[in-house]
Image (cartoon, rainbow, N blue to C red):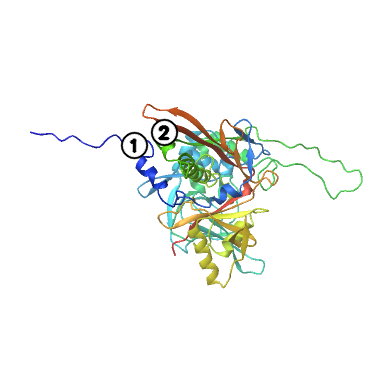
């Protein structure tokens, strides 16, 4: 019986000499990298240099905590609201009795609506709290001249009719109609009363919630002012209150260890420096990961940190000029849109259907498509779902304009580029030279209306 020994050695830890020779024997190009993109987000964001690695965003006191969106669970087709998520309803904010919330959540019943079916007609008694678990709902009203108008489009996690919790008697001011198949959880007024009888604390909290502190339309604590008076009118006294627990952003990090064999560094450095080429491509990959994290990271990524009131839904599905106008109207001094290239193509198709041809504008010397003078920049880091939907971001930037900023710390040890360091990490027993390559970054939204997102944009048509 004979045995065959494997001739394969251990996996290489650095660039082999055979690969290194590819750069030393012919007329050649620098190593090319297919994964490099334009990285418009990194190029367009103003960067704030930190001294301590932490960035605190101080804001005026707001009376609208949470994200304003309700979360659900499901077992098969049976959908239930998470009891603690009911605190997102304005009358229940700050209520801390979990047992009462659990009992209240059990009172919601599930309904299904088909596209075009009316969920709540205008003028009928407002006698239900409705939570949208899945689907898209159109809020319709009557215009000044009697025509129908679309006031808003609501999606997953939205709600209406929360005033029923306070016992308020009123009628629906708008008509709510399903655009897509919808699952809605409903709490009827008569189902609420047994819960109030069982939990005195809930009844007292709801009665107090009707006396909300003065606030502006953004939910910030009001500043008392007087205007239009004459004579010796007594002026109100006021002060500006701040958030007691402002948000702090800590710098995130993307790192890798670059390994180069000393033989390669010594023998194959002409006409191209092997270490520099390896480092150049590694930094390109790190910058690509940096942009991906700044968009998709659950902690600080822009797609996850957009305020609920700045999350919009398309009217019909594809991105139309009407949707772009709605997104643009939600903020002042919008600097740019950011969208996946396929989304930009879908918007172009909708413009072509209407006979509209968006203008071309120059950004940093590059011609790009624009809408209302605001450039639409491509970014392949914005996710595209399996069902063919994506998102479009629109943002105001800069500290002076209370916008979106990038965060970095410069002056770090062995800095190679702003916020990026390359540190020699030693030579192993196998003569492999190691370099620790690190970049530190984050992103911050200074005020909620600085960033808006058009969600669930259909691009597959």
In depth, the one of 224 and 212 nearer the eye is 224
**Which residue in the protein does label 1 denote?**
12
372 to 160, vertically: above or below: below
Circle 1 packing at 10 Å, graded few (<14), some (14-19), many (20+), is few
**Image quadrant where residue 125 sits:** bottom right
**Which residue in the protein does label 2 denote?**
262
124 to 279, vertically: above or below: below
Report whether residue 173 is seen.
Answer: no
In depth, the one of 16 and 146 nearer the eye is 16
**Image quadrant where residue 363 sits:** bottom right
The x, y position of residue 396, in whole percent, is 64, 50
Residue found at x 64% / y 57%: 329
Q: Which mark is residue 452?
A: none
Q: Of helix, strand and loop, which one carries label 1? A: loop
Residue found at x 67% / y 38%: 61
Give the residue at the far left of this rendering: 1
The x, y position of residue 221, in whole percent, is 69, 40
In depth, the one of 154 and 205 nearer the eye is 154
Instruction: First in sequence, mark 2 or 1: give its number.
Output: 1
The x, y position of residue 178, in whole percent, is 48, 60
Report whether residue 98 is seen.
Answer: yes
Query: Which of the two discs, 2 and 1, sits closer to the camera?
Result: 2
Left or right relative to 282: residue 356: right
**Image quadrant where residue 50 sits:** top right
Left or right relative to 22: residue 71: right
Give the residue at the far right of this rendering: 231
In depth, the one of 286 and 402 nearer the eye is 286
């Amino acid at each position: 019986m004979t045995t065959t020994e494997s001739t394969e050695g251990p996996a290489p830890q650095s660039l082999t000499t055979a690969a290194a020779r590819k750069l030393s024997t012919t007329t050649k190009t620098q190593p090319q990298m297919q994964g490099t993109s334009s990285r418009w987000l990194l190029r367009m964001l103003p960067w704030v240099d930190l001294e301590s690695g932490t960035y605190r965003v101080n804001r005026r006191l707001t009376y609208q905590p949470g994200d304003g969106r309700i979360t659900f669970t499901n077992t098969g087709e049976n959908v239930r609201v998470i009891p603690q998520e009911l605190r997102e309803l304005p009358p229940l904010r700050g209520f801390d009795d979990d047992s009462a919330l659990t009992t209240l959540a059990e009172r919601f019943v599930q309904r299904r609506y088909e596209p075009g079916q009316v969920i709540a007609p205008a003028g009928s008694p407002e006698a239900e709290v409705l939570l949208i678990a899945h689907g898209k709902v159109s809020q319709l009203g009557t215009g000044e001249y009697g025509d129908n108008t679309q006031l808003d489009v609501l999606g997953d996690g939205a709600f209406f009719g929360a005033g029923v919790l306070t016992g308020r008697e009123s009628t629906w001011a708008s008509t709510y109609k399903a655009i897509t198949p919808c699952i809605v959880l409903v709490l009827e007024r008569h189902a609420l009363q047994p819960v109030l009888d069982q939990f005195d604390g809930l009844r007292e909290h709801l009665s107090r919630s009707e006396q909300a502190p003065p606030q502006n339309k953004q939910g910030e604590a009001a500043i008392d002012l007087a205007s239009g008076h004459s004579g010796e009118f007594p002026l109100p006294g006021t002060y500006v209150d701040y958030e007691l627990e402002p948000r702090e952003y800590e710098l995130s990090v993307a790192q890798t260890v670059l390994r180069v064999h000393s033989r390669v560094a010594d023998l194959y450095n002409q006409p191209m420096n092997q270490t520099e080429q390896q480092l150049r491509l590694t930094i390109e990959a790190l910058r690509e990961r940096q942009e991906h994290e700044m968009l998709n990271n659950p902690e600080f990524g822009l797609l996850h940190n957009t305020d609920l009131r700045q999350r919009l839904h398309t009217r019909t599905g594809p991105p139309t000029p009407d949707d772009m106008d709605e997104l643009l109207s939600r903020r002042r001094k919008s600097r740019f849109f950011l969208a996946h290239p396929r989304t930009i193509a879908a918007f172009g198709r909708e413009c072509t259907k209407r006979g509209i041809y968006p203008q071309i504008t120059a950004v940093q010397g590059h011609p790009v498509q624009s809408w209302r003078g605001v450039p639409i920049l491509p970014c392949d880091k914005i996710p595209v779902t399996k069902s063919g939907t994506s998102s479009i971001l629109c943002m105001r930037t800069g500290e002076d304009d209370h916008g979106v900023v990038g965060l970095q710390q410069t002056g770090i040890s062995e800095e190679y580029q702003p916020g990026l360091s390359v540190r020699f990490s030693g030579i192993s027993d196998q003569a492999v030279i190691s370099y620790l390559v690190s970049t530190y970054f984050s992103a911050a939204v200074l005020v909620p209306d600085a960033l808006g997102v058009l969600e669930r944009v259909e691009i597959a048509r």
